Image (cartoon, coloured by chain):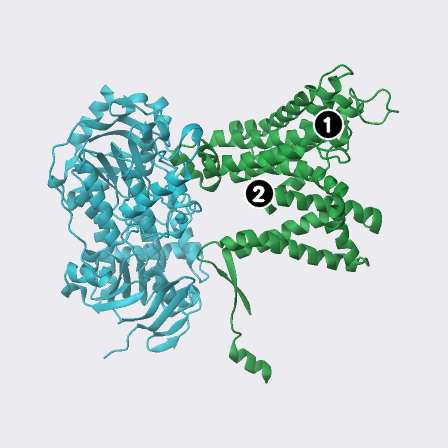
Amino acid sequence: MLKLEPRPQASRLWTYASPVLALVLTVLLGVALFMALGKDPVRGLQMFFWEPIKTSYALGELMVKATPLLVIALGLSVCFRSNVWNIGAEGQFVIGAVCAGGVALLADKDTGRWIVLAVLLAGVLGGMLWAGITALLRDRFNASEILVSLMLVYVADMVLSYLVYGPWKDPAGFNFPQSKTFEVVTQIPRLMSGSRVSVGLLLALVGAGLLWVFLFRTRAGFAQQVGGLAPAAARYAGFSSRKALWVALLTSGGAAGLAGALEVAGPIGQLTPYVPAGYGFAAIIVAFVGRLHPAGMVLSAVLMSMFYIGGELAQSRLGLPKSITGVFQGLLLFCLLACDTLVAYRLRWVAANRSALKIGGV
Amino acid sequence: MTTPLLSLQGITKRYPGVVANQDVSLTVMPGQAHAVLGENGAGKSTLMKIIYGSVKPDEGQVFFKGQPVNIRNPQEARKLGISMVFQHFSLFDTLTVAENVWLGLDKTLSLAEVTERIVAKASEYGLDLEPERPVHTLSVGEMQRVEIIRALLTEPKLLILDEPTSVLTPQAVEKLFVVLHKLVSQGVSILYISHKLHEIRALCSACTVLRGGKLTGVCDPREESNASLSRLMIGAEPPALQHVAREPGAVVLSVKGLSLTRQDPFGVDLDGIDLQVRAGEVVGLAGVSGNGQKELLWALSGEDTRAGAQCGAASVSLLGQPVAALGPVPRRQMGLHFVPEERLGRGAVPSLSLSQNLLLTRSEAVGAGGWVRMGALADQARSVIERFKVKASGPDAAAQSLSGGNLQKFIVGREISATPKLLIVSQPTWGVDVGAAAQIRAEILALRDAGCAVLVVSEELEELFELSDRMHVIAKGRLSPSVARTEATVERIGEWMSGLWPDAADKAQEVQHAQA
């Protein structure tokens, strides 16, 4: 009989092994899922884990999707480490995209390349503003940041809809709800020709490095996390919980807004009602699967991006519904939560009760 | 020879990484008050939980009235006639005394019947208790009476008491002992868990001593000396402290007319606190917990800065500077270091390493721009570990992996090695074994001799008598006048702990308020 037994100390090994085991379980469940749907499981897994890395173009697409996920997750990890539960990165992403789009729409044929910086800055400020509302309500009225940030996602979606159905609608766009296509000059510079990967990827990787330094090598980063780990200790040390709240929300809001700007001024190139692609929610999974650690989140962002691309391929080539992406994301998160039990507990074989066996034998 | 009421044979209980009880035997005769003596972590509580059915032993057998029994849960224990009063009360604050007792009983009685029985039991044993009062209006001593009544209503043959006096004034302890003596004379057996030798000697006729989970002796405590019992309990005698009289220096901490309303509904209002601590003296603050100690310490450490606005910036001053409106960081920069009573979660972050926990209050390893020099930080942690003999695997050990006593040594060490001008320590040796306690007390006295002002808040009177030059008592949010240690007696301090100090001093304080 298997028995769960508390460990005297949390296992360091399982802290890192748990995401790997969770991935293995997700793949196994995926195989079962494909078989139940009557699809060839090998073909199915190929869509998710081989096709996205097969060619340099596919790898590029993988990075295009991993970039916003990573940028958002980096910001969220600051929040989650400080015990601030920002669930509304999606809304901050949308408002960042709206502000960046607004600046991009101002550009004309004669505008210089500096506009790219203005677009990115507008995205960051927009995201910070949106997260700032949550911070203000929490700070002043002690409103739950979980609910406020989540509900602001829907408000942000409405703001976007209002603009693309109304004032910002392209007059020459056959009444489609979308803005004009941005001028080429506003386009985020690409890293190489033949791939859609932009400098956004570099920004994300530099951001991961900076986050590591902040979290593990500065006192400010330490103070930020103490508030999440032990609020009474933060108060004892004199680390301000209000400051931690604002830093957490403004950082994650700014990061999500930056991701929004990188998307609209990059792969999308205009504002449409389809800007919100769920990156803000998927990034929550990225952050936790990556153990809220910068290096871990780089890996988990790539993994989550595979799920996105694999889901699209499964739709076009295997005729599976696109929601398979969400199913895989959910499976991974649930498996991770289950596997995390092993960090604090260990499994032990307990010899079955002998007398019970005898009775069973008779 | 009569059959023992309870007998344990060869009890062993292992937890992952630790053996809580190893081959422990215990025999309690009917009508005997039997002490279980041992340090924190010696395995006393585990043994009691085994008797009470909340923990299952890995090996060994329990006999009750000579019959082997397998007690699977507390309900079964109560059916056999075993009742237990826990150290931490399990009472609902918002319910009345009678309702709380009613909830704890297995039988189906009406609330009115339970109330009647409470009144009957209370008068039988001279425990005054009003069944209609909500529990949150009771003092700690009264709450304990509720627990005892609840236990007595099950008509136990064996009553287990786990460190019952740790929350009581000396007078309340005497009242409790009257009740316990009466129970014993009626033939009830008592298992009394404690590490206070004089209490055991006053109550018990037999004593089982545990050390590190093993049985180290069975004796009659009335025939043993403190030294011999200590040897059984810790394997050595604690060294005596050297307390040399010294002339105190300038005033370091001065509190004037500090009044604050409570922040949480079950807290205490501070009412006109006046207090001075001088360089080179230890001031002890006695009192039953929950009488304003917590609130006063918040205001002194800077975790609560409301005093700045409500009582004026000078209501708390440090080295002559008004600090009442300042937070913990500026106060620490002026030389105030504070060891809080809660170690895990306040004094230290449980999941972080000892090195990282230094950063809570120390900044020697922090360079320009807030950059943390990891090497220097680890060296600093190593030096605290060495100097204060902390048992830890190294600077990277998580705070929660240390035992309570070792973590306390580390936290006290962290604050003392900062060479503070004022050290405030709350419950310096709570849950710390005798050896480590002696070491911590010696370090506090060494700091005083080096000219530091020290304020010690403790519930252990013996400790305050050992450490202090002067003592105050805090009761119901008010502070007593100070009394030199040489003039203080346990009886007098005990009386003051109920808030009864001489009126003359009271009036003098009021005059001071009026002036302030």
Secondary structure beneath label 2: helix
Locate the C terminus of chain A and report the quarter of the image it occupies.
bottom right
Q: In the rendered image of this protein, does residue A54 appear above or below residue B328? A: below
The color chain A is rendered in: green
Farthest residue, direction front: A193
The color chain B is rendered in: cyan
Q: In the rendered image of this protein, does residue A236 appear above or below residue B158? A: above
Question: Circle 2 sits on which residue?
Answer: A295
Q: In the rendered image of this protein, does residue B471 appear above or below residue B389? A: above
Q: Considering depth in this image, is B145 or B447 the residue closer to the camera? A: B447
Q: In the rendered image of this protein, does residue B122 appear above or below residue B215? A: above
Q: Considering depth in this image, is B179 or B212 the residue closer to the camera? A: B212
**Residue lying at 37% horizontally and 26% vertically, measured from the top left:** B306
Chain ID at mark 2 = A
Question: Circle 1 sits on which residue?
Answer: A265
Farthest residue, direction top: A110
Q: Amino acid at mark 2?
A: Ala
Q: Does the rendering let one see residue B401?
A: yes
Q: Point out the tag, 1 or 2, that comes first from the N-terminus.
A: 1
Task: State the count of labels.
Answer: 2
* Dot 1 crowding, Cα within 10 Å, few <14, some 14–19, many 20+: many
Q: CA distance from mark 1 to mark 2?
A: 27 Å
